[in-house]
Amino acid sequence: MNKTYHFWITGCQMNYADARRVATELQRLGYQSTPNMNEADVVILQTCTVRQQSEDKAVNKLANLKPLKQKDPNKTIAVMGCVVGVRGNEALAQAFPFVDVFMEPSTNGRPLVNHLAQGEDQEMEQTAVAQLHAWQDGEVILPAAERGRLVSAPVAVVYGCSHACSFCIIPQKRGIERSRPVGEIAAEVRSLAAQGVKEVVLLGQIVDRYGYDVPDGPNLAHLLRVINGIEGVERIRFLTSHPNYMTDEILTAVRDLPKVMPQIEVPIQAGNDEVLGNMKREYSSEAYRRLVQRIRRIVPDAAIHCDIIVGFSGETDAQFQETAAILAELKLDKIHLARYSPRPGTVSARRLPDDVAEDEKRRRFHIIEQLQKEILTEKMKVWRGRTVNVLVEDKYKGRWRGRSPQGKLVFFDDPRELKGQMVDVKISHTGPWSMSGEAVDKPQPESIPLVMA
């Protein structure tokens, strides 16, 4: 009887990429994925701490696993990700003594593999030892349920971060910036493509700093050119970028490489220079404005997405209005919006007061939310009557759902099985968050001959 594992994952796409890495090692050891946590031999929690709510969710889930361990002491419970972090897990081990293994973010799974090999037969021990170096080739093995069904997959290209914005906990949790070798990344992408994946999303905390930690090493533009040449991959996206490192070389690669999608994720965070300084973002609002102009000049059809934090330490209403004003001016394609919440261990939590009332944070949040809705309602109208190429991801409420090259969500009806296919869709309706239409080559219903009684 095959042994099984179950992943519970929360947080960013990097967490899903990390989980796939560990799952590959488990499958090489003969384990199979199961959706049933209660029946799994190994349960792994992949956790997030970017916000307090995320950390609380992970800790609550972890506490709920105690009865499972009590019922079956042979069950292995592992915790990985940012709740564990890179600075040890003594406090976690004391709080949750029933957990067998703690693993840092972006782990190679070595602690879990070693634990599972203990007490096993010699063959498994030898396999486990081989596992310690298996990831160097970059190959991944998808669970059986995902093979030939997974359309888009995240691929980590640079781990950690050395920039240290004052509000961000990631450097403390994921460690310093480390770029993966080009060959290792390419091997992972090839293995995903061989298992049916059509789109890869290259990930980094600051993805456009890829290669900066390697003297005379490759850069993101070089990596994009390599991945663009891999057979089977049809679309490439990358995120998240930082305004200071978005070079013309990267933008030219986006423009010229047919598989790289014209979608740029480049946060501004705030529109006031004093607030940006307190955030340690190291650029001005005018510099961001010039960047948007440069992106639109080099990649005219690019969709530009950004992040905004409202209610940061010391942000006055006048400073917030500058954020609203620059967003109204630039008319970006998507805003990832958050209310400021200090994270223990960050510079802002130690040195800056959280002095904007929660009610005020919510008010500012809703203002930007409404502004974004108004901007996108108008911007999306340009797609009416146009045909867009959609990579179909899945069905939602009976309709096919996929994304355009710019990352726009597209819905359409079609009787065919189209998951994972590229479909040209003529847009007939647009809203602020999505659009819909019909496949250009949609088959007509077969005529049924009239039979006389």
Image (tube, rainbow, N blue to C red):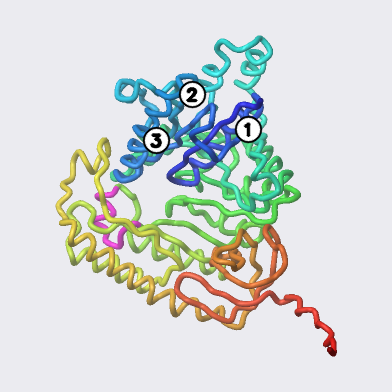
Report the residue that reaches farthest toward the bottom: 452
Mark 3 and 1 residues: CB-CB less than 8 Å, in contact? no
Q: Which residues are magenta?
A: 269-279
Q: Helix, strand or loop at disc 3?
A: loop
Q: Position of residue 232 (x, y in %)?
A: 74, 50
Verify whether residue 248 appears in magenta.
no
Q: Residues within 10 Å of mark 2 (few under 14, many from 20)?
A: many
Q: Amino acid at mark 2?
A: Thr
**Does residue 296 appear anywhere in the picture?**
yes
Q: Amino acid at mark 3?
A: Cys
Identify residue for label 2: 76
Mark 2 and 1 residues: CB-CB less than 8 Å, in contact? no
Compare residues 8 and 308 and report the one nearer the observer: 8
Identify residue for label 3: 82
Q: Helix, strand or loop at disc 1?
A: strand
> Is the residue 68 above or below the residue 445 in the image?
above
3 or 2: tag closer to the N-terminus = 2
Residue at x 25% of width, y 40% of height: 347
Identify residue for label 1: 32
Can you tell which quarter of the image residue 362 is in?
Answer: bottom left
Residue at x 62% of width, y 54% of height: 236
Image-based side of 265 in relation to 21, left or right: left
